[in-house]
Amino acid sequence: MEGTVNFSAGPSALPAPVVERIREDLPDWNGTGACVAELSHRGEPFMELAAGLEARLRRLMEIPETHRVLFLQGGAQMQFAAVPLNLAGEGGTASYVDTGAWSARAIAEARRFCRVQVAASSEGDGYRSIPPRGEWEVAPESAYLHYVANETIAGVEFGSVPDSGAAPLVSDMSSNLLSRPVDVGRFGVIYAGAQKNMGVSGLTVVLVREDLLDRAHPLTPTVVRYSAQAAAGSMANTPCTFAWYVASLVLEWIEGEGGLTAMAVRNERKASRLYRAIDASDFYSNRIPARCRSRMNVSFELADEALDPAFLEGAAEAGFIGLKGHRALGGMRASIYNAMPERGVERLVAFLEDFERRRG
């Protein structure tokens, strides 16, 4: 049997060469005689890593000089509070597009700090679609317009960047950042947890436009105040140094693989292959409209859910982990982020076809 294939939604698989490099570096990083996690974040070796990490991310994403790059803690959910605190000021209004569980959580958190206008919602169809842009009702006084670029639970993804009008556009890109090129200049803020396409949990990247740095509510804590972290080089508090190190290796790997354009081509090919296999079968189904299907998280159901335990047992025997769907939705979910090789998807397709022959 071939090795294990990790379809976990996050924390998710790392590129195999990155895992090998971590193994090699762990006892003695760059000749320092210590693990990178043991070294001072103020020391020269780590400061060089930090500068290289930002430089490589700017290069890969073509981040304009109008935007600051922050490497923070607290996960994307910390940003659910940080965004309204930093952008809405005192008594401001923000508009949100509600397309899934993460959108809903962001909305609930934002309501603690500002007035929220839900511009559009797909809750009525179980969060299986994206409302057409023409139906959105964005409050004219909005400090920003927020959307989640990819909802991991059902597998719903925006195919393009929506128009935000006069409001700065804010996006949670935790599950599809670095999966394809994006025009950063169109955004006021982009934030993302690293544990999908950029490394391990414990690191959150925030790209914030310079002119938005001075809008924070006066009571915004220092560690989540964008201006304070920007002034301190993301080190207003001790950073998660190991996560920064892993991110630097992942970005190096992406660059070596051809950058974001190459990632986009590969990710589209993987997702298309898996969706074709599901659509060609009466035994499996995906209920997301084609125009908003995720390239990162492919959800599917068996025609007879009584077979779910047998499917998961067989998948484990075949070397697959992480295929069980989110507890809120059930069914199955294959997360196929950047690190997932095309061979992993082909193995899953072969298993789907074999299980259907035997149990369908």
Image: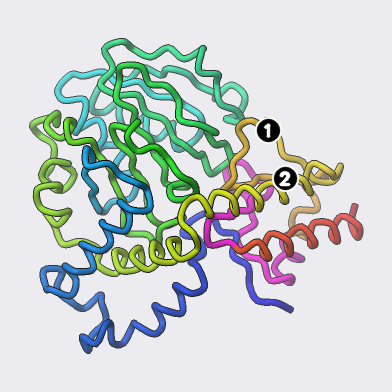
Looking at the image, residue 33 sits to the left or right of residue 59; the answer is left
Q: Position of residue 77 (x, y in %)?
A: 34, 43
Q: Nearer the viewer, residue 287 or 258?
A: 258
Looking at the image, residue 107 sits to the left or right of residue 348; the answer is left
Q: Secondary structure at mark 2?
A: helix
Instruction: Say if 211 sits above or below 43 in the image.
Output: above
Which residue: 68% across, 71% down? 319
Q: Nearer the viewer, residue 271 or 138?
A: 271
- Disc 2 crowd rating (10 Å Cα; few below 14, some 14-19, many 20+) is some
Q: Position of residue 249 (x, y in %)?
A: 37, 68
Give me the disc on residue 275. 2
- Name which residue type carries label 2: Tyr
Which residue: 70% across, 77% down? 2
Instruction: Say if 260 sits above or below 173 in the image.
Output: below
Looking at the image, residue 296 sits to the left or right of residue 38; the answer is right
Instruction: Say if 198 sits above or below 85 in the image.
Output: below
Which residue: 51% across, 39% down? 151
Label 1: which residue? Answer: 290
Q: Position of residue 91 (x, y in %)?
A: 18, 19
Residue 327 on the magenta span: yes
Q: Nearer the viewer, residue 259 or 251?
A: 259
Q: Which residues are magenta?
A: 312-340
Q: Position of residue 213 (x, y in %)?
A: 15, 35
- Disc 1 crowd rating (10 Å Cα; few below 14, some 14-19, many 20+) is few
Which quarter of the figure is the N terminus placed in? bottom right
- Name which residue type carries label 1: Ala
Q: Earlier in the sequence, mark 1 or mark 2?
A: 2
Residue 96 on the magenta span: no
Give the CA separation, mark 1 to mark 2.
9 Å
Cβ atoms at labels 1 and 2 below 8 Å apart:
yes
